[in-house]
Amino acid sequence: MGFKRFDPEDLVISNDAVTATVWSNNNPTLTAFYTSSVQVVSSNAEYYYDVYQTASSDDTAAVQFSVAYCDAQGSGSTFYNALVTGSSPTRTNYGQYRTLILGDENASFVFGNQSSSYFYVINVERARYKESLLPGTMTLYISGSGGRQVLTDDSNLGNAAVFTDAGRRYNLVSGSAGTIYTGNNTNGWTANSGSYGWFLPDVGLILLSGEALDGAYASAGGVTLNTTRSFDSASFNQGKIIDGFNAAGDSSFGFTLNSKETLSSDFVFVRARNSEFNYSENPAFISGSTGEVLFNSFIDDPKTYITTVGLYNDNSELLAVAKLSRPLQKDFTKELLVRVKLDF
Amino acid sequence: MGYLNNQVVTIDAILTKKGRELLAKGDGTFRITQFALSDDEIDYTMYNPNHPSGSAYYGEAIENMPLLEAFPDETQIMKYKLATLPRGTAKMPIISLGLESVVLKQTAATQITPQTLNYLDNNRTSEPSGYVFTISDVRLMSSFTATGINTDSVASLNGGDVPPGFRRTESGKLIPDPTTSANSVTTNGTNVSRTVIGTTLSLRATGVNTLFGSQTALYATLNVIGRDSGARIQVPVIVNKTTT
């Protein structure tokens, strides 16, 4: 017989968490933030800007994340129709994220203990974060005319995550890599605007409170970002916050973030007993055309060399195959146990 | 005294083309239930039972050879399977098809009935569990069927006389079965293999001219594996274009 059936305990499914950097080329920290000159004049520029890790004209340029500005009153962008006050891309953005995260058109965003009517959203490219963002790994430097702030999430506080319609939600606070800086207040929040926003790892979103960032550094813990909230005027506030990332300092700063992915693997244990698989159909194992084994010693003491493991279905169709790094000798005195890993 | 190596050898597997096809089909046929081992790439003439350093060195030339990575063509890997046979076996089972290659004109048909030598008693020429027939590119055939083995699993694989959307009960009655509708999915596009099981293979060459392009013949391979003996043979399949 050439085939051997598996026992039920030979097939094991394993789920392992794999963490990795979010940005291209496995860079742990993104230190330069580029926009596309084509995209920032396109029809969707009033909704969001794409951010690249290098000049968008470069062959290796890839979108790392997008930044959108959201305003409950619709300020910061032109109205769709001058006759309908407040109906604008920034208000559409606000409603879009409110539906996604809060699931209630009457709810409002409350960052920390303060209600917010305008905020920025960092929307990490799905291919970059794979399955989810990894809480406790974020460090984001941002500068404004009033100073520089460094932000992280508060997942290390030990409090259970708050669950929204978009999965887990943590507060954005002052600090780095999950370690909270309590200089502003004990929670790492601003003095008068609550937390700096929300970190939503399951959907790859980071919300930055406009009120918190627009506050003064010394008195409130903000950076004086100077968000423009004029009606019926394209302010492109998302460009201001990208400038704030770029202005944050040298290469030791920037935006650090990791992802987490669950890899499901099939482990198949291949067991060959001592009495099994000791002869071969290899033409080199056979002498002549009538089937005699190559050496007389192979009659009572055959030696075979395993190079390949084939996994089959009931119909004897070859589904997967694995090669050993070097041949393994098999004879009537040896047994074999090989673990084959099949990733999905 | 030293420590014994208790580490399990772990290797990564890749899906074959057939594996990807069945996974995409999603009809439950991608289900690993059995395995086989092979010694592809091994040249046993490098085994030296006269090595001056003794028996520990007989396989020296083989054991240190680097191996190639796996390739995904299921018809070109796992070619030489290891077999489980009684100790003292002096002759290996050999499959005979009675032909060196299968050459057909378009729309022509033929039958192949393999025989296994050195394995069965004198009164039998065909293995009781039949043979696995695999053609590397099923597009070359308008019909590729096998008969002679009548188990349910083989009937399901071969298609048999069970129409799509039905299944046969143990008593042989046909009943509707929506779960088998997916089995009737036809694979289009590039070349894929097809496997059937039986004691006799019937095949008819395609009549479709567009496959030939500017060529006058199409080529594939036919693998035949004995389900009991593990013996294997591969022959080329050639379909010659019929000029009109």
Image: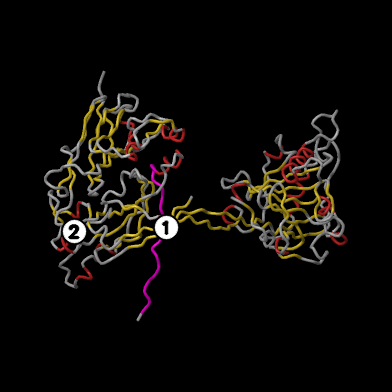
Q: Is residue B4 magenta?
A: yes
| Viewer-proximal residue among A267 and A123 | A267
Q: Secondary structure at mark 1?
A: helix
Q: Quadrant of residue B124?
A: top left
Instruction: Check the residue under mark 2 and report the chain it is in.
Output: B
Task: Give the amino acid at mark 2.
Answer: Thr
Q: Whole-percent x and y of residue B243?
A: 25, 20
Task: Give the amino acid at mark 1.
Answer: Glu
Q: Residue at x 31, y 45 (%)?
A: B76
Q: Which residue is mark 2?
A: B45
Q: Which residue is mark 1?
A: A9
Q: Residue at x 42, y 40 (%)?
A: B21
Crowding around mark 2 (Cα neighbors within 10 Å: few <14, some 14 to 19, many 20+) is some
Q: Is residue B188 visible?
A: no
| Viewer-proximal residue among B163 and B82 | B163
Vertical relation: A156 (above or below) B121: below
Q: Whole-percent x and y of residue A4?
A: 31, 53
Specify how the rendered protein is coloured.
secondary structure
Q: Quadrant of residue B144?
A: top left
Vertical relation: A232 (above or below) A304: above
Q: Quadrant of the N terminus of chain B?
A: bottom left
